[in-house]
Image: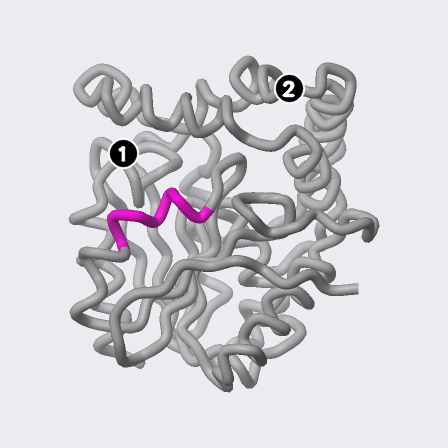
Amino acid sequence: MTVELTYQESGHGTPLVLLHAFPLSSAMWATQHWLLADTCRVITPDQRGWGDSPLGDEEPSMDVLVDDLALLLDDLELDRIVLGGASMGGYVAMHFLRRYPERVRGLVLANTKATADNDKAAANRIGIAHALEHTHSAEPLIENVFTNLLGETTRSAKPAVADAVKAAIRAAPPDAAAWAEYAMASRADSLDVLRSADVPALIISGEEDALITDRDVEAMASALSDAKVVEIPHAGHMTAIEDPTAFDGAIRTLLARV
């Protein structure tokens, strides 16, 4: 069963739906709302369990998240959108493209990858999920996730950004975070989806991203027929937060192509 997602909206024109990273809510897109609202209609849902969106009782699955998004688009009477996702949001975006290719007119993949987790990565996710369920707190995310989210430049030169991200992670709902970890651990490879895609695409990477490799970026770029790659210097895994001006500038270049 789908759940009714809460969302924020600003601007007018081409609908741009941005899906948030793990373990943050749609609040991560606050800057995009005021930087991009003059160019497009920015819609940022909270995926199930995050923000005010209910978690529901479905088993963890990317398909469940895709169904939630499809329901939201139906409610908003949006047939075709530019769909973007950061990290976990990118996984959901690619799975949505698999199920509903006719509804995607442009694609943004930021700090994400198309390949599935290997056994070691999946086991690590499941271990974090178990810790979240055992402690009923977000501290396992601070211990195991936070360190790799921001680039060294951000951590050293932008302490206020680092503090804000840490506070947001500490406020993450443990049950939703565990659910998301299980869903990500079992997700399918999406390279075949990208090979079949026939839409303008933008891949955004961070020069200091500790989680996404150059090989991950190259695999997505090679699979897509019409992709532009933008690497943001001095930024890590959270480019939209670490350098929103560069991030949003890249988005504008895609919007001009769709």
The quadrant where residue 84 appears: bottom left
Which is more foreground, mark 2 or mark 1? 2
Q: Quadrant of the C terminus?
A: bottom left
What numbered label is drawn on residue 2? none
- Is the residue marked by circle 1 packed among few (<14), some (14-19), or many (20+) residues within 10 Å? many
Q: Name the residue that disc number 1 marks.
A: 235
Q: Position of residue 19 (x, y in %)?
A: 48, 55
Q: Give the extent of the magenta segment.
A: 26-32
Q: Is residue 168 above or below residue 71?
A: above
Q: Identify which residue, 144 or 49, lies in the foreground.
A: 49
Q: Quadrant of the N terminus?
A: bottom right
Q: Give the left or right position of residue 218, taking residue 158 as reference.
A: right
As measured in the structure, the alpha-carbon distance from the residue carrying label 2 to the one carrying label 1 is 28 Å
Q: Earlier in the sequence, mark 2 or mark 1?
A: 2
Q: Name the residue that disc number 2 marks.
A: 137
User: What amino acid does circle 2 point to?
Assistant: Ser
User: What amino acid does circle 1 point to?
Assistant: Ala
